Amino acid sequence: MSMVEKEVIEKIGEYVAKKGGQHREWYLGLAEDPKKAMFQKHNVDKDTDYWFFKFATDAIEAARIQDKMLMSGFDGEKVSHDAKAIGVFVYRKRPHTKE
């Protein structure tokens, strides 16, 4: 595991622990532009919802991070990866968000 991979997993874990809730209450995904993905595609409210993102080094590393986080209980959809999708994002699911 690379240092960046370890750091991304740790930072996401720390953020989720700080904000609370079970892993299954959080959605984790990958995107080239994580803010656009969260705020437009997933309907996350940037002012009132809990959300966080970090960038992996490349798409392979991002996919490994996603695999590990999904196996640890996070919600998310495993899809074929875009080579530019190196942003790893997480948000707390709420009734208005779209998974």
Image: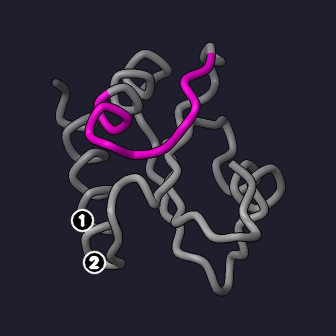
Image quarter for residue 30?
A: top right
Q: Nearer the viewer, residue 19 or 56?
A: 19
Q: Amino acid at mark 1?
A: Glu
In the depicted structure, whether residue 7 falls above or below residue 49? above
Q: Residue at x 68, y 48 (%)?
A: 99
Identify the magenta region: 68-79
Contact (Cβ within 8 Å) of mark 2 with mark 1: yes
How many other residues sit within 10 Å of disc 2, few (<14), some (14-19) or many (≥20)? few
Give me the disc on residue 14. 1
Give me the disc on residue 18. 2
Give me the disc on residue 63. none
Q: Residue 40: x, y in percent?
A: 83, 56
Judging from the image, what secondary structure is the residue with disc 2 in? helix
Q: Residue 94: x, y in percent?
A: 63, 70
As measured in the structure, the alpha-carbon distance from the residue carrying label 2 to the one carrying label 1 is: 6 Å
Q: Residue at x 48, y 63 (%)?
A: 52
Q: Is residue 36 left or right of residue 31?
A: right
How many other residues sit within 10 Å of disc 1, few (<14), some (14-19) or many (≥20)? few
Judging from the image, what secondary structure is the residue with disc 1 in? helix
In the depicted structure, whether residue 78 falls above or below residue 69? above
Q: Amino acid at mark 2?
A: Lys
Q: Residue at x 64, y 37 (%)?
A: 31
